[in-house]
Amino acid sequence: MASNWKLLTVSYARKIILLALLLNIDVCLGFASTTINCMKSGQDGLSTWLICTVNGTVVSGIRWIRPNGNNHLVVAQCNLANDQCIPPGNIKGYNVLIDPSTGQHTLTIDSFNSSTDAGEWACRDGTGSGQFTCIKTLTVLNPESEVSESTIILIVAAVLLVIIAVPAIWFCNKRMKRQPKPEEEQTENKTQEAEDEKGQHDK
């Protein structure tokens, strides 16, 4: 009876060890290490990008997670082969390009939205390993130093007007100086007529 109990105990112990090994296979293998770079700051309405470098074997699948106003949301889920990423659900405006030779991911945000895209981003395999988060900041423009597009157009138009107008005015003034005034023409005509009459009398 004691030997049967011992065999049963050993059998259960082996099963428990095997089950623990299967359940913790991810821990044994280890998640791929990722390093994310948020690159330059984003500006509302403009495109921007982030880069994620993946090292090691991907176990769970790389996920791109946006800040979403501190309510983090997955915007791209990549397969285990690490060669394709798709947005889950109806998420749009996020595209991931993977370099096959290095496995490096480049996520492009088509139109940056500070309410959802500014803050802590994550690129990770499973629960994450490595430097898998970074802060994407918002570009803050100084209204005093910002020159609008319409202002630039007006300045360019004014400069072109000056460039065209100055030579035109100079040319007109020069031409007017060369032409005799009407009074001078009449005086010259009268003088010529008087000389002609005097010449006829002398004859």
Image (cartoon, rainbow, N blue to C red):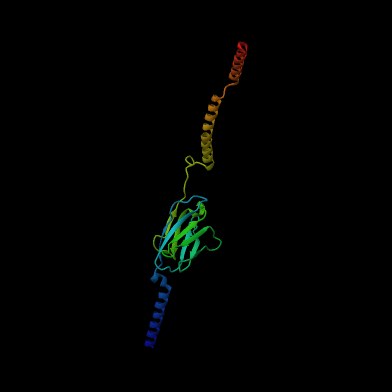
Of all residues, the one furthest to the front in this rendering is 203
149 above or below 82?
Answer: above
Residue 168, given in percent of the width and then of the height, sits at 54, 32
135 above or below 79?
Answer: above
The tally of labels here is 0
Quadrant into which the C terminus falls: top right
| x 39%, y 80%: residue | 14
Residue 173 lies in what quarter of the image?
Answer: top right
| x 41%, y 70%: residue | 26
177 above or below 18?
Answer: above
The answer to which of 192 and 153 lies nearer the viewer is 192
Q: Is residue 24 visible?
A: no
Residue 101, given in percent of the width and then of the height, sits at 42, 65
Residue 5, given in percent of the width and then of the height, sits at 39, 85
| x 37%, y 87%: residue | 3
Residue 36, given in percent of the width and then of the height, sits at 42, 59
The answer to which of 200 and 10 lies nearer the viewer is 200
Residue 182 lies in what quarter of the image?
Answer: top right
Of all residues, the one furthest to the top in this rendering is 202
Quadrant into which the N terminus falls: bottom left
149 above or below 11?
Answer: above
Q: Is residue 117 visible?
A: yes
* In-image side of 160 versus 7 (left or right): right
The answer to which of 182 and 79 lies nearer the viewer is 182
